[in-house]
Amino acid sequence: MKPHAILAAVLVTALAAGAVWGRSPGQHARTPVTAEDFAPILAALKTEAAAFTKAAGDEGPTASEALANVRYTLAATGELAKALKGGRPVPLERLYIAYQLAAPLKMAGDDVLRKLRPALAKLHADHCKYKPMPRWPAPMLQRLAAAADEDAPEARRKLAAKDRKKKNAAEQAVIKHNRTVAALEDVIKDLMAMMSDDEADEFLLDRLKHEQAKRLAAYKVTLATIKVQAVSMRAERAKGLYDKLRVIAADAGEPRTRRYAELRTPAYAPAANSSFKQVKGNFVAETLQVVNHLATTAKQPAVKVPGQKKPTKSGGRPRRKRNR
């Protein structure tokens, strides 16, 4: 998947979710506050979460109608924080419910978001954990490869069919889990960026450093999240991010293209260990591009981006020097 395709997929998901979580024409916003208000919402989400977990395939979550027209107010933060902690014993169900509850916060005010920042940070630390693809024993993979031969004995093909079913189910479960984690993580990143809060910014920067160190393509989402908010930032906040992103870029090493794992996108292999899609990216150059996006708001000079041609005053091709 190309880098711009990843961002496009994230934006499409956000827009689709907004269509459900936004207020529908002719309907009044619901503002749950008490435990009694949240009870029917949580009951519906628990049923949905159980069905989502049991469903076959590797698809991630979509927006729930149970949260349609919901608006959170400051009075709701206490009960919402409790609900976000979750009590479901099945991790995927807990992730699903947290994702659905957190998504409408995009329509909430700064006071609500800041009040919930500790709960959101803990939610991320405790539950947003990606899973690796399983590794299969060599004899099993050999059976799967041999079964592709049309002359393979019937008994061998039947055994391979059982192996294949087991392999597919386990690998798809990993992708479904990772897509749910990614959906929740993307929402939390958006909310942190919207807060205009120093600790929320540190959350995003720490996540960016982690993604760079672990070679995760999710760094592109983190940078895009910061970039989207850059235009509306206060100059002081933009300056802080401008400076810190420059340091992160400098610490990342040589500005060259590398491969990064996209943990929500599978690279299934029928008779070998499956893996995740690898996307190309230049972390340093992309980070400095966001730095330059912040520069105007921060009232700071633009920086040189590796591999990017220096703009000319005329906006056209650089002029040749005349021989004198």
Image (cartoon, rainbow, N blue to C red):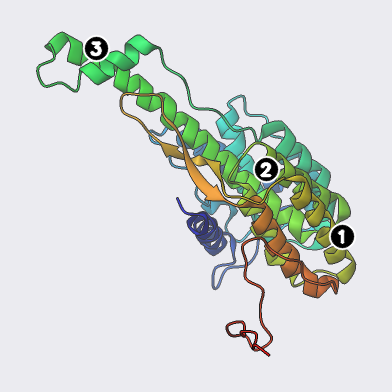
Q: Residues within 10 Å of mark 1 (few under 14, many from 20)?
A: some
**Quadrant location of the C terminus?**
bottom right
Q: Earlier in the sequence, mark 3 or mark 1?
A: 3
Callout 3, which amino acid? Leu
Name above or below for residue 92 compared with residue 307: above
Check disc 3 and report the residue beneath it: 159
Residue 297 percent across, percent down from the top left: 81, 73
Residue at image location 37% in from the left, 12% down from the top? 138
Check disc 2 and report the residue beneath it: 212
Residue closest to the eye, 210 or 16: 210
Helix, strand or loop for disc 2: helix
Q: Is residue 119 visible?
A: yes
Name above or below for residue 199 compared with residue 155: below
Q: Is residue 161 visible?
A: no
**Are discs 3 and 1 less than 8 Å apart at CB?**
no
CA distance separating discs 3 and 1: 60 Å
Residue at image location 61% in from the left, 34% down from the top? 94
Callout 1, which amino acid? Gly
Name above or below for residue 150 compared with residue 183: above
Residue at image location 62% in from the left, 24% down from the top? 89
